[in-house]
Image (cartoon, grey):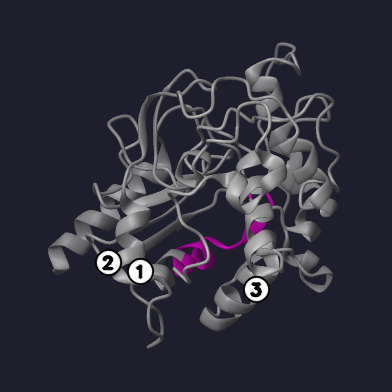
Amino acid sequence: QDGLLDLDRTVAHYWPEFGVHGKDRLLLREALSHQAGLLGVEGGFALDEFTTSQAASRLASEKPAWRPGSCFGYHALTIGIIMEELCRRVTGTSLQSLYDHRIRTAYGIDFFLGLPEELEPRYRDVLYDVDPPQPWLDPLSLAGLNSNAAVGSIMELPNHRTVRAAGMSAAGGVGTAEGLARLYAGAITGVDGRAPLLTHETVRVMSQEQVWGLDRVSGLDNAFAVVFMKPHMSRNFGSHRAFGHEGANAALGFADPAYGLGFGYIPQRAEDGRTPGKAHRLAAEVRRAASALS
């Protein structure tokens, strides 16, 4: 929106070290819609490494798991590393700092990328039901690389203070459901009399689907805009203009320009995220109510 990034330029234009092992022609819009094939690194990332330039350097030198731009698969953690390094390259500051000053503070959002230590008493661990032992996940498989299996369970990441403090953009966001909804509402409609964060043109770009079909990592149907998930038949959380994201714990947040709303749902106890559940039912009710009021 500030004109610092062009989605139709290559990632290597902004990040020259990225352009190795066949990644030199990968466009920004392709990388940000999960087409890079950079799911992780052998040996995994340390918990305190995700938000660092070191993690970006390791990822840039990695060989992709498929020919970049030829297909897509959800980059659960590395999409954050890519976004954060691009932010550092074009603004000279961290994505976390940019978010804190231009978005969170400005719009009064109770959702953090980097939870201050004094707010730690408000945090509640993500809880999990007792399940039978899970089968071993090969850390060198696509799913294993994608979930950083060489280091630990992706589902446990938010429960580590190191992750919450650093505010890794892919899995370190901490806040309330109201804060998440306010974030998305602030983006498209503004809140409390403040103008929307995004222009109409930026909303149009963010709403535009880039890929749809079989996700190489999950083996399920999926759809992505730039960074964000798009609704589709098996994940029908909003209108065709909506963009947002599901979380690993069946959380859901999205903006829906067609209804002029932001939505946030964050359960404390894990739900089965493989099929649409409570969040999608609530989202449908909210859209139905918004439609009745219009």
With 78 as the anchor, is 263 left or right in this view? left
Establish if 192 lies above or below 24: below
Q: In terms of secondary structure, where does tag 1 sit?
A: helix
The residue identified by callout 1 is 188
Q: Is residue 130 visible?
A: no
The residue identified by callout 2 is 260
User: Magenta segment, which residues?
Assistant: 170-183
Q: Looking at numbered disc 2 in the image, what kind of residue is underneath it?
A: Gly
Q: Residues within 10 Å of mark 3 (few under 14, many from 20)?
A: some
Classify residue 141 by image quadrant.
Answer: top right
Q: Could you tell me which quadrant the N terminus lies in? A: bottom left
Q: Residue at x 76, y 25 (%)?
A: 149
Spatial distance from mark 3 to mark 1, Cα to Cα? 18 Å
Q: Could you tell me residue 26's position as x and y percent?
A: 52, 37
The residue identified by callout 3 is 100
Q: In terms of secondary structure, where does tag 2 sit?
A: loop
Q: Residue at x 69, y 61 (%)?
A: 88
Foreground pick, 133 / 81: 81
Q: Looking at numbered disc 3 in the image, what kind of residue is underneath it?
A: Asp
Residue 152: in magenta span: no
Tag 2 and tag 1, C-beta contact below 8 Å: yes
Which label belongs to residue 114?
none
